[in-house]
Image: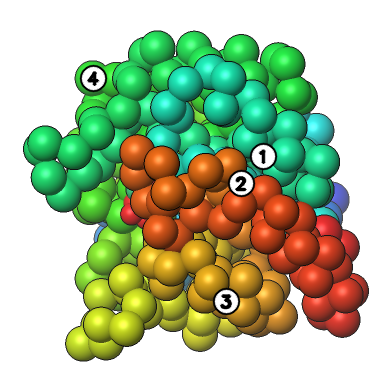
Amino acid sequence: MIIVLRPDATEEQQDHIIKKLKGLGLQVHISKGTERTIFGAIGDEAILQSVPLEAIPGVEKVLPILKPYKLASRDFRKENTVIDVGGMQIGGNRIAVMAGPCAIENKTLLVEIAKEVKAAGANFLRGGAFKPRTSPYAFQGLEEEGLKYLAETRERVGLPVVTEVMDPRDIDMIVKYADIIQIGARNMQNFRLLKDVGLCKKPVLLKRGISATIKEWLMSAEYIMSGGNHQVILCERGIRTYETATRNTLDLSAIPVLKQMTHLPVVVDPSHAVGKWDLVAPMAKAAVAAGADGLIIEVHSNPEEALCDGEQSLKPKSFKQLMDELRPIAVAVGRTI
Ligand code: PEP
Ligand code: MN
C-alpha cells in the first residue's frame, strides 16, 4: 500500500502514521521525493482494509501497489533513484562508467589498468576476487588477497570499486573493501544472498539472471530492498536465447522497459552480453542511446594472457576510443559522460 502524505504533513504527523502502521505489523519504507513523501506499507495489506488511513491527519491518499514488486516500482517512487558512491553518482545526469578486468590477477596489473581506465574517463573500477566460473578447474579468483589489491588500488588511483559477492558467508569481508557489491547473473535468484545484502549499507549492482524475465529481476531487487537496502542498481548483461553468434543476447529494450517499471538506475554490461571485444563498442553506444544510466566494461592490458574473459576484454586504447565516441552520443540524449 502506498500512503501519499500531504505536502504540509508535520514531523509529528509522520511519526504518528509510522507508529500506527508498525503497530499493525507492517513494514514501513519511506520515499522522500522532491514534492511528496510517500510511505510504502509492506505486509498483509488485508489488515489495512478496515483501517480508515485517509482519516489520519497528514495523509492525502492511500493507494494499493498492484505490482508484485513494490519498493522497486515507479508507483512507490516517481523520481529516479540516484545512488551516491563517494561523491560519484549513478542514476543522475552523468553516465557512470565502471571499467576494469574481469578478475583481479595481481596488484601491478590492476593498478596499471585502473590508471588507464581513469585517464580515459571511467569513474569506477571493476574487478572480481570471487569468480563464478563454469568449470571448477578454471581460475576462481584471488579472494581476500584480491580484495586487498582492489582497496589499495582505490587509494592509489582514486576510483571507487565494484566487486562480486557469491556467498553470504563472504559478505562481511567484501563490504570492508568494496564500494559497490555485485550480485552476478548466476546468483540473481540466490534468495539467501539477496536477503543478506539487503541488510548491508552498501549499494548493490544486481545483474540480470541468465534466463530471468524483467519481472523476476525486479522481484530480486525487491528482496534486497525489503531488507532495508534501497541502493540497488540493475545491470542488464545479456540473456540466453537461441542465438549463438554472441555469448548472450543483449536485451536493449530492457532499458526503456525498466525506466517505466522502476525508479532504480539501469547499467548495461555489453562485455558479458556479446562475449567478443570487437562487438562491445557498438552495444555500449546503443545502450547509452537507449537511456542506460551507466556501463560496466571489461578492460585488460593484455587480453590474450587474461585469466578470465580475455576474448571480450577491450585493451585500454580501444576503451579510450570508445569513451571518446560515447561523448557525443551521451550529449545527443541529454546526458554527460
Ligand atoms: C562479471 O561481471 O565478472 C560476471 C561474472 O558477470 P555475470 O554475472 O553477468 O556473468
Ligand atoms: Mn567477466
Say if residue 69 shows up in the picture. Answer: no
Using the numbered discs, state the Cα–Cα distance from disc 4 to disc 1 in whole angstroms. Answer: 25 Å
N-term mark: 4 or 3: 4
Closest to the camera, between mark 4 and mark 3, is 3
Secondary structure under tag 4 reads helix
What residue would you read off at disc 3? 283
N-term mark: 4 or 2: 2
Q: Amino acid at mark 1?
A: Phe
Using the numbered discs, state the Cα–Cα distance from disc 2 to disc 3 in whole angstroms. Answer: 15 Å
Mark 2 CB lies closer than 8 A to ligand 1:
no
What residue would you read off at disc 1? 124
Residue at image location 37% in from the left, 13% down from the top:
144
Image quadrant holding the C terminus, namely bottom right
N-term mark: 1 or 2: 2
Q: Amino acid at mark 2?
A: Ala
What residue would you read off at disc 4? 169
User: Are the residues tagged 1 and 2 within 8 Å (C-beta)?
Assistant: yes
Closest to the camera, between mark 4 and mark 1, is 1
Does residue 92 sit above or below 129 in this rendering?
below
Using the numbered discs, state the Cα–Cα distance from disc 4 to disc 3 in whole angstroms. Answer: 35 Å
N-term mark: 4 or 1: 1
Q: Amino acid at mark 3?
A: Met
Using the numbered discs, state the Cα–Cα distance from disc 3 to disc 1 in whole angstroms. Answer: 19 Å
Does residue 267 sit above or below 289 in this rendering?
above
Left or right of 211 in this view: 234:
right
Closest to the camera, between mark 3 and mark 1, is 3
What residue would you read off at disc 2? 99
Secondary structure under tag 2 reads strand
Q: Amino acid at mark 4?
A: Arg
Residue at image location 18% in from the left, 38% down from the top:
138
N-term mark: 3 or 1: 1
